[in-house]
Amino acid sequence: MQCTEIVYRALKRGWAPGESIPAEAFIRKIKQPDPSSEPRVEEGVSLSRQKYATARECRCKLRKMRGAASLHVGRVRGLPLHLDVHPDPDRNADGAVIGPDHCSLVNLPDPVNDTLSAESAASHLIKIARFVTPEEEEEEHRARRP
């Protein structure tokens, strides 16, 4: 991906416009199907590429998302954390690309084994992320999807 690209992160329903972007937006999800199993941590954080999707489309892909934050890929790479954003298009069972907008924020610390580093990385990302206002979201969407 080019350093000049913009990517979006959908913000969960517990977040309200006007509040700070929550740290959990940039912490890898922990999944534990049942209490007897080991927790499984996702490889990265899912994002959408502005090149293929609007902020509104990013937000609406998942149910009940309250907003979207934007990140500049070059600024992510410029952090002293070795983070990167890689294309990770969604594919169907035959391997054909069905979602070219999907990408992943990778090299984030493991939130199970290194909570402090995970929270520190998230705080760095919050500082460079920008909330996309509802007005900006609608304007972008109208301009690209008339």
Image (tube, rainbow, N blue to C red):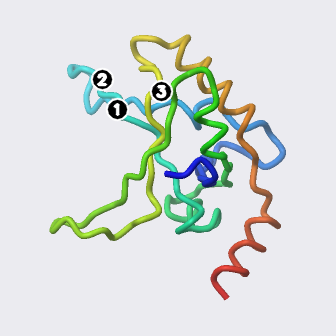
Secondary structure, mark 2, is loop
Sequence-wise first label, 1 or 3:
1
- Which label is found at residue 108? 3
Q: CA distance from mark 1 to mark 3?
A: 16 Å
The disc, 2 or 3, on the residue closer to the chain's N-terminal end is 2
64 relative to 130, above or below? below
Label 2 CA crowd tier, 10 Å (few <14, some 14–19, many 20+): some
Neighbour tally class for label 1: few under 14, some 14-19, many 20 plus, Cα within 10 Å? few
In the drawing, what numbered circle is on residue 60?
A: none
State the separation of the CA atoms marked 2 and 3. 17 Å
Task: Please tell me which residue is depicted at 67% across the width and 38% down the height of the picture.
Answer: 75
Instruction: Identify the mark at residue 39; answer none if there is no mark.
Output: 2
- The one nearer the camera, 19 or 85, is 85
Vertical relation: 111 (above or below) 146: above
Label 2 and label 1: CA atoms lie apart by 6 Å
Residue at (65%, 43%) from the top-left corner?
Answer: 14
Q: Nearer the viewer, mark 1 or mark 3?
A: 3
Amino acid type assigned to the residue bearing label 2 in the image: Pro
Q: Name the residue beneath numbered marker 1.
A: 31
Q: Tag 3: residue type?
A: Leu
Q: Quadrant of residue 122?
A: top right
- The residue sitting at 53% across, 68% down in the picture is 52
Task: Tell me the kind of residue under disc 1.
Answer: Lys
Residue 79 at x, y percent in the picture = 63, 27
Rate crowding at label 3 as few (under 14), some (14 to 19) or many (20 or more) other CA atoms within 10 Å: many
